[in-house]
Image (cartoon, grey):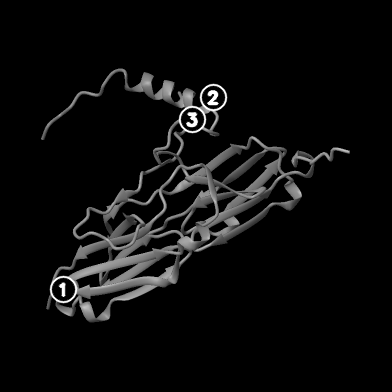
Amino acid sequence: MTERQQLQVQKKREQEKREETTIPARVFLPTTDIYEAQDALTVILEMPGVEKSNVSVGVENGVLNVEGRLDLSKYQGLQPLYIEYNIGHYSRSFHLSSKIDQGKIEAAMKDGVLSLTLPKVEEAKPRTISVG
Amino acid sequence: MITAFADPYDGLFNLQRALEERTKSEWLQNQTSSQGPFPPINVFQQGDEILAIIELPGIDKNDLQIQAKENTIRISGKKVVNYPESSVHRRERVFGEFDRTLSLPVQIDPDGIKAEYRDGVLALFLPRSEREKPRTIKIS
């Protein structure tokens, strides 16, 4: 009947506050895609407006923390006329299973999209056993 | 497993919603929730210039077209998200073809439009058309 539906954008989810922040900006959760290949887990986070130098990725106590800060000085002096989405920093954390080799995590950032490659520990990779 | 019957009015409501989306203008809607057509656009004013900021992370510049005519701006293209053969654990990113037209309440100068795409954010600088600028009149 109708043509394909228009793509809908999801509302930005705000981070549930664990501690209070010392800055006035809000923190949101970046939209994430996670997929698993044979030898690595890949996590893709969308953080538009964040430069590569303002991204911090760290692992602590088996928790992967990703933070991206926006340069809010660009918005100074601008008068809002029509606002559809929220602007703020990004932060999200994930628990890592023991199958991930935490020392070999790699990160690459391009066009506001951060790709994290979490290689699996050797024992967790699938192994084929040949039949003698 | 809970089996739910499809609401028989679903098809009807979807049709009504689609028709409403087509007819309403996207400028100065009374909705401020960031739900709506993709991609989300924020419009600011800086002095005499209008600044449209659009969040489009992970777009190839070849997949993006911007057209301007009189007082409308059209942003169209497609966002591609490709994953190799693997099992997907979580899928939150929005992707696909998009086509949005924004009508502005002021006339803009199409030749003076500058577009900048950086870090997943497309910024459009729309200068006001020369004829639109108010002229001060001196009292002799």
Q: Position of residue B60 (x, y in %)?
A: 54, 59
The chain to which mark 2 is attached is B
Q: Which residue is mark 1?
A: A124
Name the secondary structure under disc 2.
helix
Mark 2 crowd level (few <14, some 14–19, many ≥20, 10 Å Cα): few
Which residue is rendered at x = 44% and y = 59% of the image?
A48
Q: Position of residue B128 (x, y in %)?
A: 71, 45
Q: Does B48 appear above or below A74?
A: above
Let me know if residue B17 appears in the view.
yes
In this view of the protein, which residue sits in the foreground, A12 or B1?
Answer: A12
Which is more N-terminal, label 1 or label 3? 3
The residue sitting at the right extreme is: B140
CA separation in Å, label 3 and label 1: 45 Å
Q: Which residue is mark 2?
A: B23
In screen coordinates, is B115 left or right of A6?
A: right
Name the secondary structure under disc 1.
helix
Quadrant, the C terminus of chain A: bottom left
In screen coordinates, is B128 left or right of A125?
A: right
Q: Which residue is mark 3?
A: A3
